[in-house]
Image: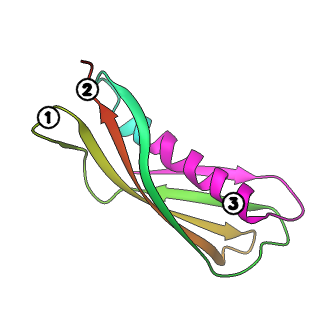
Amino acid sequence: MSFFVAFSSNTLFAGSIYAGAIMAGYRLAEKAFEGIEGTLVAKEARIRYFKAILSDGFAVAAADNDPVRKTNGNCTLDVMITVNDLQGIPCALLSAEFVLFAPR
């Protein structure tokens, strides 16, 4: 399962790269949790920057596994998001854990 987000800017800074990557991950998580009730949050995330993006760019989010339901009723999904420049060169990598909190 994967999700794609495009960036439209001449230069992408750390904040916009992070925001776009988290948005791509969030949209993927929404799709993965479709049909399950709850509140979706990014529980934690870590980003590594490899090089500046001096053009437009794009983020691709992917999850290797299906969501996991925990004993407390919450569901989790680990997502990796790669942010690339227009040539497809990886410029940042964000790993995030998304949690769907069960209604209480």
Q: Secondary structure at mark 2?
A: loop
Q: Which mark is residue 72?
A: 1
Measured from the top left, where is residue 99 in percent x and y? 34, 41
Q: Which mark is residue 47?
A: none
Query: In terms of depth relative to the viewer, which is nearer, 37 or 34?
Result: 37
Q: Secondary structure at mark 3?
A: helix
Where does the C terminus fall, quadrant-wise?
top left
The stretch drawn in magenta includes residue 93: no
Mark count: 3
Residue drawn at x 69%, y 60% is 17
Highlighted magenta segment, given as a residue range: 1-28
Q: What residue is pinned by disc 3?
A: 17
The amino acid pointed to by label 2 is Ala
Gap between marks 1 and 2 measured at Cα: 8 Å
Quadrant position of residue 39: top left
Q: Please, is residue 59 above or below residue 43 in the view? A: below
Q: Are marks 1 and 2 in contact (CB under 8 Å)?
A: yes
